[in-house]
Image (cartoon, rainbow, N blue to C red):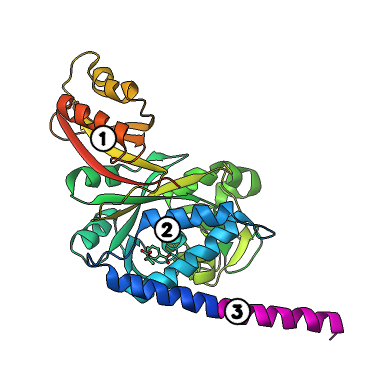
Amino acid sequence: MSEELKQLRNQIDTIDEELLLLISKRAGLAQQIGKIKKSGIIYRPEREAQILTRMQEQNPGPISSKHIKQLFIEIMSVCRALERPMSVAYLGPSGTFSEDAALKRFGNAISTLACDSIDEVFRAVESDSANYGVVPVENSTEGAVGRTMDLLLQTSLIICGEIQLAIHQFLMAQQSGLSHIKKIYTHPQSFAQCHQWLKVNLPQISDIAFVTTASNAEAARQAAADAHAAAIASKRAAELFGLSICAENIEDDPKNTTRFLVIGKQLVDASGKDKTSLILSTSNHSGAIYKLLEPLARYGVSMSRLESRPSRAGLWQYVFFVDIEGHQQDQKVAAALVELRDKAAFLKILGSYPVT
Ligand SMILES: C=C(O[C@@H]1C=C(C(=O)O)C=C[C@H]1O)C(=O)O
């Protein structure tokens, strides 16, 4: 070993020892905070969002802000776990994008509960089998996830956060290469997201049998038991089922993103950069939705999403899912909400939470 290398490694060893002491000291403080929290609610999304923003703003380099964020998410994850272990339900099985989203937000020091359906995720949180749930709400290519929206309307759960996940699809099989593929297991959404790529890159496409599965992870599991088959799934699913990557990033739209929601029972305080989600309904006369939303414009509250969904209360009757900028405790948002409540036939505040 050269003298220079030895010296640099010695410096790293010294820094690691300092880091270890500092992280342990931080964890000790989190433990003390845990004891003070009388409400029993450990996870504070607004505080974590503020820490992540501050660390990225103060990042001196050379580490990228994205990686600084990942590091601090893991540090906070282990600190939180020392206060109290936390469980997060998600749309399983293990290896799905929902699991990726849960780990992206909460870090790895959590216990996860894989659920068979979106309904089951909601039920797990409602019955306290899990502290929080992670469910998909919209995809940039495929649009809204109706079941999540229906359950937000029906249950009393609150939105505590959102997670945006870039969805990268991988083609995987027992062996690498493309020519041996005679069958592809895929979830219909993933298939729709990769359709063009498959047509261009698989000359044998007309002879390939496409088999629909309930999730990406299930597709990978099936391909792991079939030597002539491939699956479309996430990179983590390939690792989980010991598959080789045949092609990476095969999604047709490189910006393909899914937005997930964190659902729970706790009201989240303001972080300084928040959004508020509402469900509204109005009577069915001309200009009704325009008149209903007018207070938002008057108080200068921007709307970032407006989506309609059948109300299931009557034929061609709708509820509107509205996201607005700001926290429900912000003065102008609070004032606009008072007027909305007055005008709307129905108003449900689904929660205020940090924007990501
Ligand atoms: C330590 C706390 O508890 C949790 C852990 C945090 C951390 O590690 O910084 C931040 C917020 C909470 O989710 C706290 O509330 O400050």
Question: What's the residue type where badge 3 is placed?
Answer: Glu
Nearest to the observer: residue 302 or residue 155: 302
What is the x, y in percent for residue 150?
A: 24, 43
Q: Are marks 1 and 2 in contact (CB under 8 Å)?
A: no
Q: Is residue 205 left or right of residue 185?
A: right
Mark 1, secondary structure of its residue: helix
Tell me if I can see residue 109 in this picture: no
Residues shaded magenta: 1-20
Label 2 lies in ligand 1 vicinity (Cβ under 8 Å) = yes
Residue plotted at (66% across, 61% down): 177
Q: Are marks 3 and 1 in contact (CB under 8 Å)?
A: no
Residue 282 versus residue 240 in the image, above or below: above
Is tag 1's residue or tag 2's residue first in the polypeptide sequence? 2
Instruction: Identify the image quadrant of the N terminus.
Output: bottom right
Question: What's the residue type where badge 1 is placed?
Answer: Ala
Q: Is residue 276 left or right of residue 15?
A: left
Q: Can you tell which of label 3 and label 2 is closer to the viewer?
A: 3
Question: What's the residue type where badge 2 is placed?
Answer: Glu
Residue plotted at (33% across, 41% down): 327
Residue 25 versus residue 105 in the image, above or below: below
Nearest to the observer: residue 320 or residue 96: 320
Judging by the rendered image, the residue that carries numbered circle 1 is 334
Tell me how far mark 3 sits from mark 1, CA to CA.
46 Å
What is the x, y in percent for residue 255?
A: 56, 42
Tell me how far mark 3 sits from mark 2, CA to CA.
23 Å
Label 3 lies in ligand 1 vicinity (Cβ under 8 Å) = no
Mark 3, secondary structure of its residue: helix
Q: Is residue 322 magenta?
A: no
Is tag 3's residue or tag 2's residue first in the polypeptide sequence? 3
Q: Which mark is residue 162?
A: none
Q: Which mark is residue 18?
A: 3
Callout 3: 10 Å neighbours few (<14), some, many (20+)? few
